[in-house]
Image: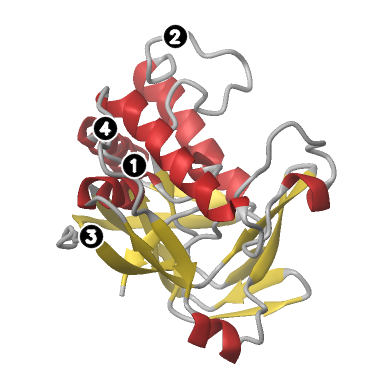
Amino acid sequence: MRLRFVFNHYAGNMSIDYNHKMRLWFSDFLMNFYGKTYDGTVADEGDDCRGFKLFTFSKLIFDSYKVREHRIGFYEGKAQWFVSSPVEDFLDDFAEYLKTIKRISVDSISFELLDISEVKMPAFDKQMKFTSLSPITVTTDGLNKRIIDDYFLRFSDSAFINKIKDNLLNKYRLYSGKKIIDDANFSFEFDSDYMERKRGKIQKKIKYERREILGYLAPFKVSGEPELLRFGYDTGFGDYCHLGFGMAKEI
């Protein structure tokens, strides 16, 4: 399930690295709406949705904006925002929470809630074409998380696709208790024409609190069991999806 939120905002500017500030909206929601993390455990101070990670969200999509010196500037207008999860109750409760508080903010910019609507679900097949609404990031195992060049896989690395697949399969098993029988045909490929037009420059480095996260923004083609692809649509592709990475839409 995917919800579309529309906000009204005044002219302003803010850092382009605001994922961690949006994450706090969910932390506040979980604590204020439930008084605990979503899996029923009491939230520790600073807990950032640790008890529930089966969701993803996009960046704010402004009607008009300009990026300059690592800041995004925009005129007064509207902004869209998308949130997805296979757990519909979570999305319904989050929507009710936003209706109650009526506005959210990033830095000093206030966003007033205007509308909430459900996005029509794509018809999933064994091959789908998507484009990323937030960067897709894939991490390695056992290396130094403080060194970005060691910790994040490049899309050209042979393990990149397998890590995306394994991440999806693991989340799917935990959520459904089922195993996808036919996962051998899973494939993932960024659009080669787009990459050629961009001269391969699809890489993004996002400052997240005191560290950097390496990700990719580009259209891509993914193949596999339709049920698994739908789960990727709902929860995101790659790592850190609950922190605002890996969201995609059909093209």
Reading the image, the residue beneath label 1 is: 98
Residues 11 and 125: in front is 125
Residue at 51% in and 81% down = 192
Reading the image, the residue beneath label 2 is: 41
Between the residue at mark 2 and the residue at mark 1, the CA separation in whole angstroms equals 23 Å
Between the residue at mark 2 and the residue at mark 3, the CA separation in whole angstroms equals 37 Å
Reading the image, the residue beneath label 3 is: 126
**Residue 145 position in % (x across, y down):** 78, 37
User: Viewer-nearest of labels 1 and 3?
Assistant: 3
Q: How many marks?
A: 4
Disc nearer the start of the sequence (4/2): 2
Between the residue at mark 4 and the residue at mark 2, the CA separation in whole angstroms equals 18 Å
User: Viewer-nearest of labels 2 and 1?
Assistant: 2
The three-letter amino acid code for the residue at tag 2 is: Thr
Disc nearer the start of the sequence (2/1): 2
Name the element at disc 2: loop
Hey, which residue is sitting farthest bottom in the picture?
197
Reading the image, the residue beneath label 4 is: 93
Between the residue at mark 4 and the residue at mark 3, the CA separation in whole angstroms equals 32 Å
The circle on residue 120 is: none
Disc nearer the start of the sequence (1/4): 4
Q: Would you call the spot at circle 1 few (<14 residues within 10 Å), some (14-19), or many (20 or more)?
A: some
Between the residue at mark 1 and the residue at mark 3, the CA separation in whole angstroms equals 35 Å
